[in-house]
Image (cartoon, helix red, strand yellow):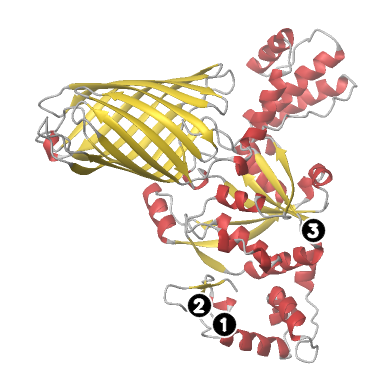
């Protein structure tokens, strides 16, 4: 019934649809709803549509009460054709929780997404062969606006209704793996047949039930755990989630529950498959591939049949990746082009070996560091001899954090708060002071290394506020918005980007207009040495507009992060501004 204790010590259901309850007060009173449910189930209804009987609408409650009442005289068996057809259609022998990797281009998916897969085979490896025949259960918000600001506000405040939906699993593969190039991780669960039956029965009940959708609390991750608690209430999974829950939290809870996880399998996206295909080509085969995809016309290939097959298989994967939506349209030109290459491939008369893409085990989401972070620091600066710093970050990852379990080239931080305390310095006549150094509501880095066929614009954005330290004003706090775009290059363990940045700062002390616009280049070099350390070297120069002084400013910095443990890191940072410098040592605690 999705009841939870409320702030006043009573109970209240998270379900927000009246038809989910038999009693008028059933959303708040456990006793009233129990009595009303038993009464509804016990009555005989003469309905034209037999599937409208309460037992048929709420089979999960029926299974529960039938077990605990220990009598058939109160609740009798009821035939339910629609539900029985639904149960047969799923034919679930196994269940897995699927994690769709981080998708930074869509705010709702920046932290990843979780859904439930119903497998027709209980063995994870065997089930993977027939996964296109399986079904999936998804929980998502029914979005009613295209405005980005309203979407964020309503998502945080419960302005959308969340709904469960069941669909063929290949629809989700097409959406995530094919269209959005997101890898999928299957966390196969060790559930008994009767536990699987409970989940399916409850999922049927959820089909007509709505919940207020909260982006950070009652979201897809939270409700997937709720379904598993129906299977076995002793698991108590939803009781173990933090108040704010993200998909990675859900996966970690599953992985750390003794006896629950049966195994993990990996489904690479179309982009990952193509990259692996390309890596297997010889230099001559790569040249032939490049020549073909330039105009997408068959050409005479050299080499053995096996070599020709490798090139054509790669071309077909390229078409599937580059034109993922068009190849689904029967009369599209891309389908006609693909058919020509399929004919050429068939003429070779040989069968290709199954492509085995290596599983990137370091990217398994349950192995990542905890999402929330507290940072303690102490340092010195050119303005005050000694200062201390306290930081809190709600979620989730920055470029210098340990990469394990994360998207290595994208970061998303939310609610990053930085506080600074300057100690009294009698020699310089500086009194002690406490201030908010920086507030980042949301900061995103989407870095796409330039590669042939995979090049994309790299960008970053940051919205919040900060204490101005470049001489524009005397340590004033200014709301700020920053957007930058450019190109990223990868050379071995070094990631480099060069961007053009635009920044708005708002404070009446910056100039008579009360704001300034700054535009200029910025560059970053990022070195990562496995799980040992990350090192960052950055610099920027900006020209300021709409100000009377400080027409330009610059800064450069260097930071090194030592990955001592998964959830405990240490670091050093030096930053030079236009007029002064800071140096600080930090300890990062993830929880």
Residue 531 image position (x, y, % from top left): 57, 29
Q: Which residue is mark 2?
A: 11
Residue 45 visible, this angle:
no
Question: Which mark is nearer the camera, 3 or 1?
Answer: 1
Closer to the camera in the image, 431 or 164: 431
Q: Residue at x 40, y 47 (%)?
A: 148
Please rate how many residues cluster around mark 2, counting C-alpha atoms within 10 Å: few if below 14, some from 14 to 19, many from 20: some
Tell me which label, 1 or 2, sits earlier in the chain.
2
Q: Secondary structure at mark 1?
A: helix
Residue 489, can we see it?
A: yes
User: Secondary structure beneath disc 3?
Assistant: loop
**Residue that carries the numbered disc 1 in the rendered image:** 30
Q: Is residue 155 above or below residue 548?
A: below
Asked if disc 1 and disc 2 are in contact, CB closer than 8 Å, the reply is: yes
Nearer to the camera, 327 or 392: 392
Q: Quadrant location of residue 176?
A: top right
* Residue occupying the point 66% across, 13% down: 290
Q: Earlier in the sequence, mark 3 or mark 1?
A: 1
Residue at image coords 77%, 20%: 312
Q: Between disc 3 and disc 2, whose residue precedes? A: 2
Instruction: Point out the image quarter for the N terminus.
Output: bottom right
In the picture of the structure, the residue carrying the numbered disc 3 is 92
């Amino acid at each position: 019934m999705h009841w939870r204790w409320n702030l006043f010590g009573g109970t209240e259901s998270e379900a927000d649809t009246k038809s989910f309850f038999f009693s008028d007060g059933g959303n708040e009173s456990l006793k009233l709803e129990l009595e009303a449910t038993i009464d509804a189930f016990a009555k005989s209804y003469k309905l034209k549509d037999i599937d409208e009987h309460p037992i048929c609408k709420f089979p999960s409650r029926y299974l529960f009460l039938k077990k605990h009442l220990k009598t058939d005289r109160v609740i009798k068996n009821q035939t339910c054709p629609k539900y029985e057809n639904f149960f047969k259609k799923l034919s679930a022998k196994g269940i897995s929780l699927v994690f769709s990797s981080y998708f930074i281009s869509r705010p709702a998916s920046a932290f990843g997404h979780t859904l439930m897969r119903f497998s027709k085979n209980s063995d994870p490896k065997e089930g993977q062969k027939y996964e296109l025949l399986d079904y999936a259960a998804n929980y998502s918000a029914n979005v009613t606006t295209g405005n980005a600001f309203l979407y964020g506000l309503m998502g945080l405040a419960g302005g959308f209704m969340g709904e469960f939906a069941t669909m063929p699993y290949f629809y989700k593969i097409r959406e995530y793996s094919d269209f959005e190039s997101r890898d999928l991780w299957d966390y196969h669960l060790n559930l008994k047949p009767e536990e699987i039956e409970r989940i399916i029965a409850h999922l049927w009940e959820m089909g007509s039930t709505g919940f207020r959708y909260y982006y950070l609390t009652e979201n897809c991750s939270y409700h997937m755990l709720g379904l598993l608690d129906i299977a076995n209430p002793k698991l108590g999974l939803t009781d173990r989630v933090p108040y704010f829950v993200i998909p990675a939290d859900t996966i970690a809870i599953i992985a750390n529950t003794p006896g629950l996880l049966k195994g993990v399998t990996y489904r690479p996206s179309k982009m990952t498959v193509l990259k692996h295909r390309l890596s297997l080509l010889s230099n001559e085969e790569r040249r032939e591939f490049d020549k073909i995809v330039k105009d997408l016309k068959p050409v005479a290939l050299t080499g053995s049949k096996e070599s020709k097959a490798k090139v054509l298989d790669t071309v077909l994967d390229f078409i599937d990746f580059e034109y993922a939506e068009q190849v689904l349209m029967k009369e599209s030109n891309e389908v006609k082009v693909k058919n020509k290459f399929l004919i050429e491939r068939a003429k070779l008369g040989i069968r290709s070996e199954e492509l085995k893409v290596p599983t990137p085990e370091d990217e398994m989401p349950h192995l990542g560091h905890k999402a929330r972070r507290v940072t303690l620091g102490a340092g010195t600066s050119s303005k005050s001899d000694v200062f201390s710093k306290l930081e809190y970050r709600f979620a989730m990852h920055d470029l210098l954090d340990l990469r394990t379990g994360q998207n290595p080239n994208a970061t998303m931080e939310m609610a990053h708060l930085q506080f600074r305390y300057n100690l009294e310095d009698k020699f310089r006549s500086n009194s002690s002071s406490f201030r908010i150094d920086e507030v980042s509501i949301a900061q995103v880095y989407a870095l796409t290394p330039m590669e042939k066929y995979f090049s994309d614009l790299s960008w970053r954005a940051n919205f919040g506020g900060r204490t101005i330290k470049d001489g524009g004003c005397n340590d004033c706090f200014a709301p700020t918005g920053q957007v930058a775009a450019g190109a990223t290059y990868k050379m071995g363990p070094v990631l480099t980007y060069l961007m053009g940045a635009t920044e708005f700062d708002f404070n009446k002390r910056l100039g008579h207009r009360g704001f300034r616009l700054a535009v200029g280049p910025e560059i970053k070099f990022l070195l990562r040495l496995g799980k040992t350390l990350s090192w960052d070297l950055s610099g920027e120069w900006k020209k300021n507009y709409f100000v009377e002084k400080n027409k330009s400013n610059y800064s450069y910095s260097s930071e090194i992060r030592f990955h001592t443990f998964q959830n405990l890191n240490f670091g050093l940072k030096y930053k030079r501004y236009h007029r002064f410098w800071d140096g600080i040592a930090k300890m990062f605690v993830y929880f």
